[in-house]
Image (cartoon, rainbow, N blue to C red):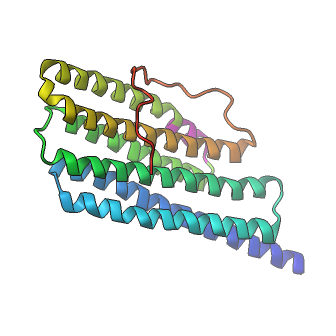
Amino acid sequence: MTSQHIVSSFDRDLEALQAMIVKMGSQAEKAISNAITALETRDMDLSQQIRRDDKIIDTMDEEIKSETARVLALRAPTAGDLRTVLSVMSISSHLERCGDYAKNIAKRNTVLIDMTPIDGTVPALRRMARMVEQMLTDALQAYIERDAEKAEDVRTRDLEVDQMYNTLFRSLLTHMMEDPRNITASMHLHFIAKNIERMGDHATSISDQTIYLVTGEMPDEDRPKGDTTALGGAGENAG
């Protein structure tokens, strides 16, 4: 009877942890969407709100880390249950980083508001951000459903995000070469694109966790990377 009670309590702990992840994921998705909306509409107030709301995501991450530590200490899970608890901690970290990148975009927005728009770049960033936001949604859904096939589909889509980034990067280079007055704005837009591309990487890493949960092994193959730009590693650190 005691054993059944412990199992039942542990199941409730896992359910609570995963509910926290879903809530945090929703907040991260909102941050991504708002960051691009603020860029499109040149909305200073929304940009500042995104920066303030990042504290909500940070707090969620701290709460999840604290709760997973409590579960590990109290329940001492083994095998598959241990993988589940550890995956929660890992996914929380990925979501927290996505929030940081959204905040970084918001910071850039506040500077770009006073600059002349670069033709075609904001719609391209919107398409890229929408794809990454959907990847994040699907990655979290795959995790909750333990759907390795859906998780693998997210991994595959990361290549398309990289290709979109490459195309935008080349476009920004052209704008800078054609008119030096575009250089400052183009550099800010490049960092925004890189932040979005890195969010795609984090969505893909969440999918890796799902595959690990389902199969017991991390994906063997390195996921295809399409970032071929010379400044591929030039994005700012999140934080």
Within the magenta stretch, is there residue 151? yes
Rendered residue at 77%/56% (across/down): 82
Q: In this orientation, which residue lies closer to the viewer: 57 or 127?
A: 57
Residue 176 x, y percent position in the rendering: 19, 23
What's drawn in magenta, residue-wise?
147-154
Within the magenta stretch, is there residue 105? no
User: Where on the picture, by quarter, is residue 185?
Assistant: top left
Rendered residue at 46%/33% (across/down): 158
In this orientation, does residue 220 appear? yes
Rendered residue at 35%/24% (across/down): 166
Rendered residue at 43%/52% (across/down): 100
In this orientation, does residue 39 appear? no
Placement of the N terminus among the 4 image quadrants: bottom right
Residue 77 x, y percent position in the rendering: 81, 62
Give the answer, above or below, for where 165 lies relative to 136.
above
Please give the count of numbered marks on the rendered protein: 0
Q: Is residue 111 left or right of residue 222?
A: left
Q: Is residue 62 left or right of residue 28?
A: right
Looking at the magenta stretch, what is its main secondary structure?
helix
